[in-house]
Amino acid sequence: MLRPRFIPKVADLKFLVDPQIRPCCGPVFFARSLESGAADNISANGSFGFVDTSKMKLLVTCQHVWAAFDVARRENPQMKMCVCPSSNSVLVLDPIQPIDQDEKLDLASFDMEPFLTKCTDSKFFPLDCENVPRVVKGDALAFVGFPGRIQAQTSIGVKFWRRLHATIAYDVSDSCVYSDVSRLKSSKPEPESVRQASARGGISGSPCFLVRQNLLLQLVGFATSEALNVLRFTLARCLNADGTLKRRFLI
């Protein structure tokens, strides 16, 4: 049986871990309109992470999220890719194209330089792409999901239910870390409507953080897929400082 190296307390997750993650991630979604009633116009949603490599400020999400948007945009040219960089703002990423994307790594990266003036309430989590901490079995991990899609309409558009998760790494490869999500710990309970929708909905692209005993966080990956209670995170070491991807880890 795998023995965790460290398990953060629920209170620590809520008051010490979550405040470090909150400013650098959020939901990404596709919408035809951001006018009143925008909730009815949203076709899909996932998550993003803001990353500062010291060379570039990037938005990172899943390649399958971008691919879905590309299909939706071809079917309806009015479709826009949007993010919520803070709890009270919606940012339309238009025009936008990835710096790089890879289906196997399931990552896509985007240059946020054109949009920085609209991200004043956000933070870009520092990442040294050549010195990403190694994850080992039993390490504690934390990430945020946005389950249940839309919680409510607001004056600015939409509001997403937000949930912080903690879990344990049970297997690690050159490009990925895996977690048994049947043992997830949450910082707070969720309403029945969210439980029925999906406890882990909207996590695709969510940044994943290594939690040490001092409760300081280190970015180590991005949530990319889930199957049979196994959640996969593609490791942040697959990202270059210029936003391109290191495919050599797939060999």
Image (cartoon, rainbow, N blue to C red):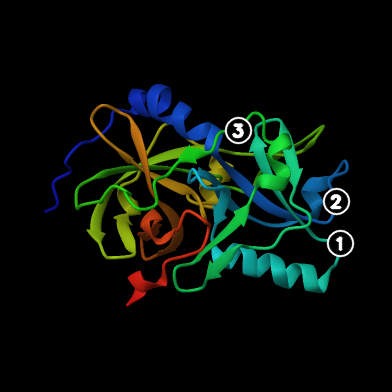
Locate the C terminus by quadrant.
Answer: bottom left
Classify residue 120 by image quadrant.
top right
Q: Residue at x 51, y 73 (%)?
A: 103
Residue 149 drawn at (x, y percent): 63, 49
Label 3: how many Cα within 10 Å (few below 14, some 14–19, many 20+): some
Give me the C-alpha separation between circle 1 and circle 3: 27 Å
Q: Residue at x 34, y 45 (%)?
A: 184
Residue 113 drawn at (x, y percent): 67, 46
Q: Are marks 2 and 1 in contact (CB under 8 Å)?
A: yes
* Secondary structure of residue under mark 1: loop
Label 1: how many Cα within 10 Å (few below 14, some 14–19, many 20+): few
Classify residue 12 by image quadrant.
top left
Give me the C-alpha separation between circle 2 and circle 1: 8 Å
Give me the C-alpha separation between circle 2 and circle 3: 23 Å
Identify the amino acid type marked 2: Ser
Locate the N terminus by quadrant.
Answer: bottom left
Identify the amino acid type marked 3: Ser
Q: Residue at x 16, y 41 (%)?
A: 5
Query: Mark 1 sits on what residue?
Result: 78
Asked if 186 appears above or below 181 in the picture, the reply is above
The earlier-in-sequence mark between 2 and 1 is 2
Question: Can the viewer see residue 120 in this picture?
Answer: yes
Label 2: how many Cα within 10 Å (few below 14, some 14–19, many 20+): some
Residue in the foreground of this view, choosing between 36 and 93: 93
Question: Can the viewer see residue 197 in this picture?
Answer: no
